[in-house]
Amino acid sequence: MSASGPTEDPRDDLRVTPPKTVAAGVPAVAHAIEYSLAQAGPQRTLLTLLSLNQAEGIDCPGCAWPDPKHRHKNEYCENGAKHVNDEATTRRVTRAFFAEHPIAELDQKSDMWLNHQGRLTEPMVKRPGATHYEPIGWDEAFGIVADGLNALASPDEAMFYTSGRLNNEAAFLLQLFSRAYGTNNLPDCSNMCHESSGSGLGETLGIGKGSVSLDDIHESDLVFVVGQNPGTNHPRMLSALEETKRNGGKVIAINPLPEAGLFRFKNPQKARGVVGRGTEIADQFLKIRPGGDLALFQMLNRMLLEAEDAAPGTVLDHDYIAAHTTGFDDFAAHARTVTWEHVLTATGLTRAEIEEVHAQVLASRRIIVCWAMGLTQHKHGVPTIREIVSFLLLRGNLGRLGAGVCPVRGHSNVQGDRTMGIWERVPDRFLDALAAEFDFEPPRAHGYDSVAGVRAMRDGKATVFVGVAGNFVRAMSDSDVTEAALRSCSLTVQISTKLNRSHTVCGETALILPTLGRSDRDVQASGEQFVTVEDSMSEVHQSRGRLAPASPDLLSEVAIIGRLARRTLGPGGAIPWEDFEADYALVRDRIARVVPGFEDFNARVAVPGGFRLPNPVNSGVFPTPSGKAVFVVNQPDWIEPPAGHLVLQSLRSHDQWNTIPYAMNDRYRGIHDARRIVMVNPDDLADLGLADRDLVDLVSVWTDGSERRAEGFRVVAYPAARGSAASYYPETNVLVPLDSVAEISNTPTSKGVIVRLEPAGAAGAAVG
């Protein structure tokens, strides 16, 4: 085995402790430092942590939460520290490693083991019929990709996928290359997470981004935190909510699982977080059934209308509704038909709980609703977002301090990628600007998103897959179908920093092209470079690596994309790829001329902290067909599992970043040394005739009569909402069929899976 990582593939050895009721504090700091030192060593850890999220330092790749105006010298959270030092690791994957391990063997390893082998160091190729990756020079590697692309009958037989780890400059060049080549096939990780947010906000407000700033969070009277777990997924949000509470605001948390960070937060940057009790975050915690959020907000909207009836002119903002919205009358008529019977069934809440929320709403003038994938990854995710927008419109809670919509993104630049044109359905005005700037006619037909892309590979309509960052095979739903689709490709290309499952599930020819990480210094012909990112609140700022690159054979993502484009498209044309590689400021100059809001990009991003992109919603301008915000009538919808079944949501463990587990622990939930577990309410276990620690198979059932099975999960009795269950992804992605997607957005329905729990091996025993 390689000395660069663990010699043993971790196996489940479940240990359970009581769930935590407080997040962060000294233990979080200790865990962050312990993991960082083990990965990167003292010197590299010191360099990364002191520069993480600083004005001219490394933008944390762990999440997209914005940076405060006045930054602490230790401006990072536990998971941010882990993630940046996971990338800054001193462990290396060399050609000797690939010679020792056949691809088939690597494919049997866990995601955690693969990640822990360390940084990739040189280009590798799997040739047709080969069992191992072998070294290849950059020039030959680019030639293989160019030849593969140019041999296709149509550019639409290729796909260019990216995750939110990509920076703005590389993202802009990737979409430019794809469109100059001739396709809009630009699936990205947004398709699998916040696409429902973009769709719902786009329909109602005309722009698919959040409207609030960090100051708005601080100054809000009432912040809803819906379908998200800040303590694990974006812990610095807890610092912002702490400020909300200290300014007199209140927080309502809505989630099927109790989450430690939403109960109490001990800010390790404050004395009260080290020696005191910390800050109570949620004033009210609603343990809602998965998918019940649409019904809850429909009832809140009905109650606001009824409160206005009882005290005319005191509840709704009629002036705002008349001046800035359309569709109110039809919406109001429908809202009045919502029944308590439906809402209580769909949510699993009591009437008293909902009435308490309503009282908090009436007492608050400035309201923000934050959400994450607990809302978006449902069949009715888009209607839920639309209903939330209506809830805010009723009282004019948009475009003023302390109020608005706040979709909380999980990748550090997933929003920036979309702004840069990484979208299979980019509007014509963007394509027109590209055409004018670079003197070519971009394709106009919409391309494949992630789900459609898997279908295309499965059906032989796409045969070349180029992945820039990310781990597509483990991020996508329907794992078996996704793996078979990628293996059917003639060529797969992964531009990556570390080893992952997408390198072991590969096409007839496969390339691994290793790239610089966010923490690495990037020196090109014109000197040291920086890149830029856009956070969840539309703030654009620099990120500058501080460490020596993991290998002298690494290229930056900008360089790799530029060289691929030059080799594929040939000489000539109006796109100066070589100049872009030499000086990223030249890329930013072109972005400034193509992308609205980026005028004078280089000068504005040079200011410490960068700049904020304009959001027309905050000026009362709505880029919808009517020019107004839209009230939408949403039909009631919720998940009704049959008797003996539960609604499963997939989620991260605490020691996990997207598809990357750092360790086998979910510390805040009290799960240790195991990942194949399923959390279920004790009363549901009793009803199902199961006991805590029973070994079960998870079987998902679908309306077309099909079933999916994930084997060998240990039951953990947990205070989840009745009728629900929770387990980790990517292990449970296999349970979600490719065609089970959200209406309109096409997002996989990973938070709304109807399952039954069978004793482990029951299916095999029955067959035998």
Image (spheres, rainbow, N blue to C red):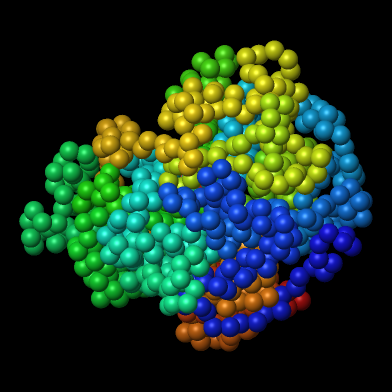
Residue 626 relative to residue 54: left or right:
left
Q: Position of residue 253 (x, y in %)?
A: 38, 67
Res 288 → quadrant: bottom left
Foreground of the two, 218 or 149: 218
Q: Where is residue 630 in the image (x, y as percent from the top left)?
A: 27, 42
Q: Residue at x 25, y 50 (%)?
A: 397
Residue 179 relative to residue 745: left or right:
right
Foreground of the two, 746 or 433: 433
Residue 635 relative to residue 704: left or right:
left
The answer to whether residue 494 is visible is no
Q: Which residue is drawn at 73% across and 41% down?
A: 515
Q: Which residue is drawn at 62% across and 56% down?
A: 49
- Relative to 589, say whether 405 is above or below: below
Q: Quadrant of the N terminus?
A: bottom right
Q: Quadrant of the C terminus?
A: bottom right
- Relative to 658, say whether 545 is above or below: above
Q: Where is residue 83 in the image (x, y as percent from the top left)?
A: 64, 57
Res 265 → quadrant: bottom left
